[in-house]
Image: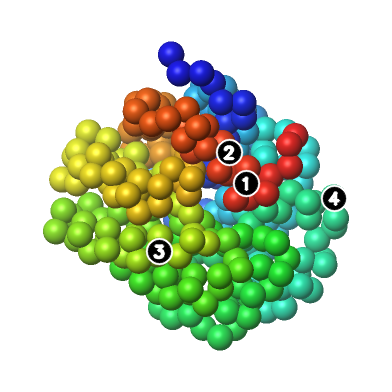
Amino acid sequence: MAPRVSRTIDAHVHLWNRATDPQPWIEPATMAVIDRDFSAADLRVMLADTGVDQAVVVQSSNSAGETARLLQLAVDDDAIAGVVGWLDLTGDVREQLDRIPERLRRTLVGVRHLVHIDPDENWLESAEVHRGLTALGEANLSFDLVVRWWQLESAARTAARHPELTFVLDHLGGVPDDADDLSRWEEGLRALAAHGNVSAKLSGVSAFIGGESGVGLGLVIDAAFGAFGALRLMYGSDWPLSQLGAGVLAWRGYVQDVLASVSADDRDAILGANAARLYRLDPR
């Protein structure tokens, strides 16, 4: 059995309380398994089940209120290593950060915007957003890229304009479930990974387990390792959304099998050290 890393971190989970933070994208008929609230207590159970110490909680809506509530949860619960929240990058980023109390601000490790569903197809490359991204870098925060595979070229151009900013690609850029599009996805992935300030999460692809989509998960993982290498990849469960696919336990097991063939140092990096470094997580 491989030795256990000193601190395992799930780099991508979500928590929501729909009374305060509605999630209208959840379709009860097709998403019944996640059609409920998910609390910090639920997170602790999931982490125990998967043998992981802590998690980075990522925003689910472009909402300052949701971010404030997630930051408070992180202060109250050591299972949460940090929060990737939301700020209006088209506004005054410094002023928004100054409004966050210091005791909450220290748990904010990055920012994300739902680029993949933004009605403005050019949002990521707008002048206002570029000013906001510059301010993020000055504040020592990262930016999570949640994009579709056809937006990877835009993401690469953005990363090139901000070499001082750490970018984290969520869910490997939205892998297409059509094998005919896979080569275009891989080309976009490599173009983005060519920028050394970009890392990626092994997350959001648990639905490919079993090969029902027609795209082999092994090819996807090989492409991710080939593009980013072990020192720029992080394990992420995408829980509870992973329950819509094979489930968090199946995904954790799959990743464990993949990492059985890499060095101990690379395994430790992917399962925790990279997240701690890239998100600048405090030991807690």
Residue at which label 4 appears: 103
The C terminus lies in which quarter of the figure? top right
Question: What's the distance in space between the residues labelled 4 and 2, CA to CA?
Answer: 24 Å
Residue at which label 3 appears: 194
Residue 57: x percent and y percent?
A: 60, 45
Q: Disc 2 residue type?
A: Ala
Q: Closer to the N terminus: mark 4 or mark 2?
A: 4
Question: What's the distance in space between the residues labelled 1 and 4, CA to CA?
Answer: 21 Å
Q: Given contact means CB atoms under 8 Å apart, are the residues at marks 1 and 4 in contact?
A: no
Image quadrant in which you'd find residue 132:
bottom right
Q: Disc 1 residue type?
A: Arg
Q: Disc 4 residue type?
A: Arg
Q: Residue 174, relative to residue 98: is it above or below?
A: above
Question: What's the distance in space between the residues labelled 1 and 2, CA to CA?
Answer: 6 Å
Residue plotted at (56% across, 73% down): 162
The mark closer to the camera, 1 or 4, is 1
Q: Given contact means CB atoms under 8 Å apart, are the residues at marks 4 and 2 in contact?
A: no
Residue at which label 2 appears: 273
Q: Closer to the N terminus: mark 1 or mark 4?
A: 4
Q: Given contact means CB atoms under 8 Å apart, are the residues at marks 1 and 2 in contact?
A: yes
Q: Closer to the N terminus: mark 1 or mark 3?
A: 3
Residue plotted at (80% across, 61% down): 100
Indicate which disc residue 277 carries.
1
How many neighbours does mark 4 have within 10 angstroms: few (below 14), some (14-19), or many (20 or more)? few
